[in-house]
Amino acid sequence: MAAGMGALFGDHSACLLCLSFLCDCPGFLIGPDMEQKRMISQATRLINTVYGATVPKITVVLRKAIGLAYLAMGGGRMGASSLLAWPTARFDVMGPDVAVELMHGREIAAASNPVEKRKQIH
């Protein structure tokens, strides 16, 4: 997995000149499949490694920078030496689909037609 490989390289950052990230992160997928693949623990390790790296960090946001995935790619408060964004780049705390489920999940589940209700709210 990419998160595991990134953490492995970051753990040996004393040998690197800098960490460079080309960021297009629609966010981390969360669910039973990802939990079985240990995605959460690998992503956490990557975030800790990037944060603790002592070499310069350069992040270029190409398209999407959403949630913790954006932080794992050296964004925001992760101590980036340089943070650049393409003119069409989008920064979000979470994706719109996740936000709709978080804010209106019970209402959608109780609806007679959940798919139509989700479209109406979105």
Image (cartoon, helix red, strand yellow):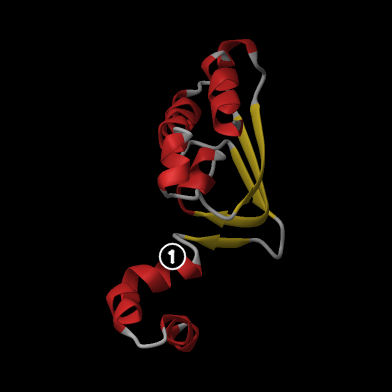
Which element type, helix, strand or loop, lies under badge 1? Answer: helix
Q: At 28% from the left edge and 75% from the top edge, which residue is drawn?
A: 106
The answer to whether 46 is drawn above or below residue 97 in the figure is: above
Few, some or many residues within 10 Å of mark 1 (<14, 14–19, 20+): few
Count of numbered circles on the image: 1
Look at the image and tell me whether residue 115 can be seen. yes
In this rendered view, identify the residue nearer to me: 12 or 36: 36
Toward the front, the furthest residue is 112
Image quadrant occupied by the N terminus: top right
Question: Which amino acid lies under the numbered mark 1 shown in the image of this protein?
Answer: Val
Foreground residue among 15 and 36? 36
Left or right of 96 on screen, residue 105: left
Where is residue 73 drawn, in percent x and y? 57, 40
| Residue 68 rendering spot, x and y as whole percentages | 45, 47
Q: Mark 1 points at which residue?
A: 98
What residue is drawn where x is 33% and y is 77%? 109
In the image, residue 98 sits, relative to residue 18, either above or below, namely below
Quarter assignment of residue 83: top right
For the point 49% across and 43% down, the residue is: 71
Q: Position of residue 46 (x, y in %)?
A: 49, 30
Q: Is residue 108 above or below residue 52?
A: below
Question: Which residue is rendered at x = 50% and y = 23% of the image?
Answer: 53
Q: Which residue lies furthest to the top in this view?
A: 15
Image coordinates for residue 115, horizontal then vertical, percent: 47, 81
Q: Does residue 76 appear in the picture of this structure?
A: no
